[in-house]
Amino acid sequence: MFAFQEMGQLPETGFIRQPQVLYLAAFSSTTLWRHCKAGTFPKPVRLSARICAWRVEDVRAWIKAQGQEEAKQLGVASTVKGDR
């Protein structure tokens, strides 16, 4: 589908367009823009009058933060279950 099949194949720097962002974030287009507007997902950079893209570094950081948040939630959930 894309030149990369997983996160490890993304370039370290550069830009990716909306289809690649949707593939990585597993959002619909509407949800992506809702998250951008709410400030819960990185905002795109306008490259020209009709083209916008996201910085790969910003998307990588967001994905990493999601993993850390999930791990935190799982840690809390396992503590609560262990206390019973």
Image: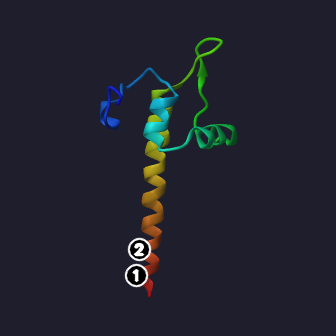
Q: Whole-percent x and y of residue 73?
A: 48, 64
**Disc 2: which residue:** 78
Dot 2 lies on which element?
Answer: helix
Kindly identify which numbered label has been placed on residue 30.
none
Q: Quadrant of the C terminus?
A: bottom left
Q: Which residue occupies 43% across, 66% down?
A: 74
Q: Quadrant of the N terminus?
A: top left
Q: 49 or 71, which is in the foreground?
A: 49
Residue type (three-letter) at the residue carrying disc 2: Ser
Q: Which residue occupies 44% across, 20% down?
A: 14
Kindly identify which numbered label has been placed on residue 82.
1
- Separation of disc 2 and disc 1 at Cα? 6 Å
Dot 1 lies on which element?
Answer: helix
Q: Which residue occupies 37% across, 26% down?
A: 12
Q: Quadrant of residue 11?
A: top left
In the image, 71: left or right of 18? left
Q: 16 or 11, which is in the foreground?
A: 16
Which residue is situated farthest in the bottom direction here?
A: 84
Q: Which residue occupies 63% across, 37% down?
A: 33
Residue type (three-letter) at the residue carrying disc 1: Gly
Number of labels in the image equals: 2
Asked if residue 21 is positioned above or below residue 48 in the image, the reply reads: below
Asked if residue 4 is positioned above or below residue 74 in the image, the reply reads: above
Q: Tell me whether circle 2 and circle 1 mark residues in contact (CB < 8 Å).
A: yes
